[in-house]
Image (cartoon, coloured by chain):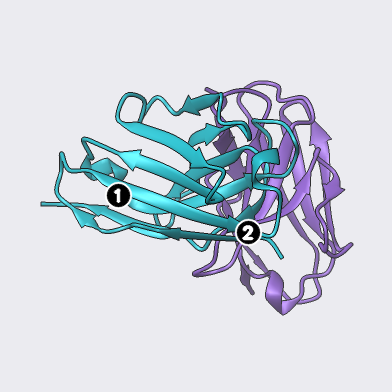
Amino acid sequence: EVQLLESGGDLVQPGGSLRLSCAASGFTFSNHAMYWVRQVPGKGPEWVSVISGSGDNTYYADSVKGRFTISRDKSKNTLYLQMNNLRVEDTAVYYCAKDATLGIGYYFDYWGQGTRVTVSS
Amino acid sequence: EIVMTQSPATLSVSPGERATLSCRASQSVSGNLAWYQQRPGQAPRLLIYGPSTRATGIPARFSGSGSGTEFTLTISSLQSEDFAVYYCQQYHDWPLTFGGGTKVEIK
Protein backbone atom coordinates (compact mmCIF):
# COMPACT_ATOMS: atom_id res chain seq x y z
CA GLU A 1 0.00 0.00 0.00
CA VAL A 2 1.38 3.38 -1.00
CA GLN A 3 1.79 5.76 1.93
CA LEU A 4 3.07 9.31 2.07
CA LEU A 5 3.52 10.84 5.49
CA GLU A 6 4.43 14.50 5.79
CA SER A 7 5.89 16.18 8.83
CA GLY A 8 7.59 19.41 9.81
CA GLY A 9 4.79 21.92 9.53
CA ASP A 10 4.74 24.61 12.20
CA LEU A 11 4.10 28.23 13.07
CA VAL A 12 7.01 30.39 11.97
CA GLN A 13 7.65 34.11 11.77
CA PRO A 14 8.05 35.90 8.44
CA GLY A 15 11.61 35.53 7.23
CA GLY A 16 12.02 32.25 9.06
CA SER A 17 12.84 28.79 7.78
CA LEU A 18 11.22 25.39 7.92
CA ARG A 19 12.01 21.95 6.56
CA LEU A 20 9.22 19.63 5.54
CA SER A 21 9.68 15.89 5.18
CA CYS A 22 7.62 13.25 3.43
CA ALA A 23 8.28 9.59 4.20
CA ALA A 24 7.25 7.34 1.33
CA SER A 25 6.52 3.63 1.32
CA GLY A 26 4.75 1.01 -0.73
CA PHE A 27 6.33 1.79 -4.11
CA THR A 28 9.75 2.07 -5.74
CA PHE A 29 10.60 5.57 -4.61
CA SER A 30 13.36 6.22 -7.14
CA ASN A 31 11.05 5.44 -10.08
CA HIS A 32 8.73 8.36 -9.55
CA ALA A 33 8.89 12.12 -9.62
CA MET A 34 7.68 13.61 -6.36
CA TYR A 35 5.93 16.91 -5.76
CA TRP A 36 5.04 19.44 -3.15
CA VAL A 37 1.61 20.95 -3.61
CA ARG A 38 0.11 23.48 -1.23
CA GLN A 39 -3.42 24.54 -0.56
CA VAL A 40 -4.93 27.45 1.28
CA PRO A 41 -8.21 26.28 2.87
CA GLY A 42 -11.12 27.03 0.54
CA LYS A 43 -8.84 27.50 -2.49
CA GLY A 44 -7.57 25.26 -5.24
CA PRO A 45 -4.26 23.46 -4.84
CA GLU A 46 -1.09 25.16 -6.02
CA TRP A 47 1.88 23.23 -7.38
CA VAL A 48 5.08 24.28 -5.57
CA SER A 49 7.93 22.07 -6.71
CA VAL A 50 8.88 18.76 -8.28
CA ILE A 51 11.94 16.55 -8.30
CA SER A 52 12.59 13.75 -10.77
CA GLY A 53 12.95 10.16 -9.66
CA SER A 54 16.71 10.32 -10.02
CA GLY A 55 16.87 13.66 -8.24
CA ASP A 56 18.69 15.22 -11.18
CA ASN A 57 15.91 17.56 -12.23
CA THR A 58 13.95 20.04 -10.17
CA TYR A 59 11.38 22.69 -11.00
CA TYR A 60 9.79 25.40 -8.91
CA ALA A 61 6.82 27.69 -9.07
CA ASP A 62 7.87 31.30 -9.59
CA SER A 63 6.34 32.18 -6.23
CA VAL A 64 8.93 30.08 -4.35
CA LYS A 65 11.91 30.07 -6.71
CA GLY A 66 15.09 31.06 -4.92
CA ARG A 67 13.55 30.50 -1.48
CA PHE A 68 12.51 26.83 -1.48
CA THR A 69 14.68 23.79 -2.25
CA ILE A 70 13.31 20.34 -2.97
CA SER A 71 15.44 17.24 -2.43
CA ARG A 72 15.12 13.51 -1.90
CA ASP A 73 17.05 10.83 -0.07
CA LYS A 74 16.67 7.47 -1.78
CA SER A 75 18.28 5.62 1.12
CA LYS A 76 15.53 6.89 3.41
CA ASN A 77 12.70 7.00 0.84
CA THR A 78 12.10 10.55 1.96
CA LEU A 79 11.25 13.76 0.16
CA TYR A 80 12.14 17.16 1.61
CA LEU A 81 11.24 20.79 1.13
CA GLN A 82 13.57 23.36 2.65
CA MET A 83 11.70 26.63 2.93
CA ASN A 84 13.67 29.81 3.62
CA ASN A 85 12.69 33.45 3.87
CA LEU A 86 9.10 32.47 4.50
CA ARG A 87 6.33 34.94 3.75
CA VAL A 88 2.82 35.29 5.11
CA GLU A 89 1.51 34.17 1.72
CA ASP A 90 3.29 30.82 2.13
CA THR A 91 0.74 29.90 4.78
CA ALA A 92 -1.04 26.74 3.61
CA VAL A 93 -1.38 23.02 4.01
CA TYR A 94 1.55 21.38 2.22
CA TYR A 95 1.05 18.01 0.57
CA CYS A 96 3.60 15.71 -0.94
CA ALA A 97 2.33 13.82 -3.94
CA LYS A 98 3.55 11.09 -6.25
CA ASP A 99 3.56 11.26 -10.03
CA ALA A 100 1.23 8.62 -11.42
CA THR A 101 3.59 7.94 -14.31
CA LEU A 102 7.26 7.17 -14.73
CA GLY A 103 7.78 10.65 -16.13
CA ILE A 104 7.71 14.14 -14.68
CA GLY A 105 5.07 16.81 -14.89
CA TYR A 106 1.88 14.80 -15.03
CA TYR A 107 -0.81 14.11 -12.44
CA PHE A 108 -0.79 12.77 -8.92
CA ASP A 109 -2.11 9.38 -7.93
CA TYR A 110 -1.21 9.49 -4.24
CA TRP A 111 -1.13 12.36 -1.79
CA GLY A 112 -0.06 12.58 1.80
CA GLN A 113 -2.35 13.81 4.53
CA GLY A 114 -0.73 17.25 4.53
CA THR A 115 1.22 19.30 7.04
CA ARG A 116 0.19 22.81 8.03
CA VAL A 117 2.57 25.73 7.67
CA THR A 118 1.58 29.04 9.23
CA VAL A 119 3.70 32.13 8.70
CA SER A 120 2.73 34.87 11.08
CA SER A 121 4.26 37.32 13.49
CA GLU B 1 0.74 30.31 -17.06
CA ILE B 2 -2.36 28.35 -18.09
CA VAL B 3 -5.33 29.48 -16.02
CA MET B 4 -7.97 26.86 -15.24
CA THR B 5 -11.49 28.13 -14.60
CA GLN B 6 -14.15 25.86 -13.13
CA SER B 7 -17.89 26.39 -13.18
CA PRO B 8 -20.15 26.56 -11.41
CA ALA B 9 -18.50 27.35 -8.09
CA THR B 10 -21.24 25.45 -6.29
CA LEU B 11 -23.61 22.84 -7.68
CA SER B 12 -26.67 21.75 -5.70
CA VAL B 13 -27.81 18.28 -6.69
CA SER B 14 -30.14 15.69 -5.19
CA PRO B 15 -28.85 12.18 -4.51
CA GLY B 16 -29.34 9.97 -7.55
CA GLU B 17 -29.27 12.88 -9.98
CA ARG B 18 -26.60 13.67 -12.55
CA ALA B 19 -23.95 16.31 -11.96
CA THR B 20 -22.05 18.04 -14.74
CA LEU B 21 -18.95 20.06 -13.86
CA SER B 22 -17.02 22.24 -16.28
CA CYS B 23 -13.39 23.20 -16.55
CA ARG B 24 -11.99 25.68 -19.04
CA ALA B 25 -8.33 26.30 -19.86
CA SER B 26 -7.03 29.71 -20.92
CA GLN B 27 -5.19 27.99 -23.78
CA SER B 28 -5.25 24.54 -25.25
CA VAL B 29 -4.00 21.76 -23.00
CA SER B 30 -4.79 19.09 -25.59
CA GLY B 31 -5.98 16.09 -23.53
CA ASN B 32 -3.63 16.71 -20.63
CA LEU B 33 -6.20 17.17 -17.93
CA ALA B 34 -6.96 15.43 -14.65
CA TRP B 35 -9.81 15.63 -12.15
CA TYR B 36 -9.60 15.23 -8.40
CA GLN B 37 -12.14 14.87 -5.62
CA GLN B 38 -11.51 16.37 -2.20
CA ARG B 39 -13.65 15.59 0.81
CA PRO B 40 -13.49 17.81 3.90
CA GLY B 41 -10.29 17.33 5.85
CA GLN B 42 -8.79 15.00 3.26
CA ALA B 43 -6.23 15.26 0.52
CA PRO B 44 -7.35 15.36 -3.10
CA ARG B 45 -7.96 11.99 -4.74
CA LEU B 46 -7.28 11.33 -8.41
CA LEU B 47 -10.45 10.49 -10.32
CA ILE B 48 -9.80 10.94 -14.03
CA TYR B 49 -6.85 11.69 -16.30
CA GLY B 50 -6.11 11.87 -19.98
CA PRO B 51 -8.97 13.35 -19.83
CA SER B 52 -11.34 10.39 -19.84
CA THR B 53 -9.48 7.53 -18.15
CA ARG B 54 -10.67 6.61 -14.69
CA ALA B 55 -8.00 6.09 -12.07
CA THR B 56 -7.73 2.78 -10.27
CA GLY B 57 -10.75 2.02 -8.14
CA ILE B 58 -12.88 4.91 -9.36
CA PRO B 59 -16.51 3.93 -9.97
CA ALA B 60 -17.93 3.96 -13.47
CA ARG B 61 -20.43 6.68 -12.56
CA PHE B 62 -17.54 9.14 -12.93
CA SER B 63 -16.67 10.08 -16.51
CA GLY B 64 -14.56 12.76 -18.12
CA SER B 65 -14.61 14.27 -21.57
CA GLY B 66 -13.30 17.16 -23.62
CA SER B 67 -10.13 18.37 -25.27
CA GLY B 68 -8.35 21.59 -26.03
CA THR B 69 -9.84 24.17 -23.70
CA GLU B 70 -13.19 22.70 -22.63
CA PHE B 71 -13.58 19.74 -20.30
CA THR B 72 -16.42 18.11 -18.41
CA LEU B 73 -16.64 15.79 -15.42
CA THR B 74 -19.94 13.95 -15.16
CA ILE B 75 -21.19 12.03 -12.17
CA SER B 76 -24.08 9.99 -13.50
CA SER B 77 -25.96 9.27 -10.28
CA LEU B 78 -24.75 11.05 -7.18
CA GLN B 79 -24.12 8.98 -4.10
CA SER B 80 -23.76 10.40 -0.60
CA GLU B 81 -19.98 10.02 -0.69
CA ASP B 82 -19.75 12.11 -3.87
CA PHE B 83 -20.67 15.36 -2.18
CA ALA B 84 -17.28 17.04 -2.14
CA VAL B 85 -15.15 19.59 -3.96
CA TYR B 86 -13.80 18.75 -7.41
CA TYR B 87 -10.71 20.20 -9.03
CA CYS B 88 -9.31 20.03 -12.53
CA GLN B 89 -5.57 20.18 -13.20
CA GLN B 90 -3.68 20.67 -16.46
CA TYR B 91 -0.38 18.96 -17.08
CA HIS B 92 0.22 20.28 -20.57
CA ASP B 93 2.76 22.88 -19.56
CA TRP B 94 4.68 24.26 -16.60
CA PRO B 95 3.63 25.40 -14.15
CA LEU B 96 1.11 22.69 -13.44
CA THR B 97 -2.09 24.51 -12.52
CA PHE B 98 -5.38 23.69 -10.87
CA GLY B 99 -8.81 25.20 -11.12
CA GLY B 100 -10.52 26.89 -8.20
CA GLY B 101 -12.90 24.00 -7.66
CA THR B 102 -16.59 23.14 -7.84
CA LYS B 103 -18.35 22.23 -4.64
CA VAL B 104 -21.07 19.63 -5.13
CA GLU B 105 -23.56 19.96 -2.31
CA ILE B 106 -26.77 18.19 -1.38
CA LYS B 107 -29.90 19.90 -2.68
Q: Colour of chain A?
A: cyan
Give the mark nearer the N terminus: 1 vs 2.
2
* Residue A67: assigned label: none
The percent position of residue B46, horizontal first and vertical second, equals: 70, 53
Where, by quadrant of the figure, is residue B60 drawn? bottom right
Circle 2 sits on which residue? A25
Q: Nearer the viewer, residue A13 or B32?
A: A13
Amino acid type, residue under disc 1 in the picture: Thr
Instruction: Give the SS element for disc 2.
Output: strand
The percent position of residue A54, horizontal first and vertical second, equals: 62, 31
- Total numbered badges shown on the rendered structure: 2
Q: Nearer the viewer, residue B103 or A64?
A: A64
Quarter of the N terminus of chain A within the rendering: bottom right
Residue lying at 34% horizontally and 40% vertically, measured from the top left? A82
Residue lying at 55% horizontally and 24% vertically, measured from the top left? A57
Q: Nearer the viewer, mark 1 or mark 2?
A: 2
Q: Colour of chain B?
A: purple
The percent position of residue A113, horizontal first and vertical second, equals: 51, 63
Residues beneath discs 1 and 2 located on the same chain: yes
3D distance between C-alphas at marks 1 and 2? 27 Å
- Local packing at callout 1 (Cα closer than 10 Å; few below 14, some 14-19, many 20+) is many
* Chain letter for the residue marked with disc 1 in the picture: A
Task: Farthest residue to the front: give it.
Answer: A75
Q: Nearer the viewer, residue B3 or A70?
A: A70
Where, by quadrant of the figure, is residue A90 drawn? top left
Residue lying at 51% horizontally and 26% vertically, measured from the top left? A58
- Local packing at callout 2 (Cα closer than 10 Å; few below 14, some 14-19, many 20+) is some
Amino acid type, residue under disc 2 in the picture: Ser
* Residue A91: assigned label: 1
Left or right side of B76 for A57? left
* Chain letter for the residue marked with disc 2 in the picture: A
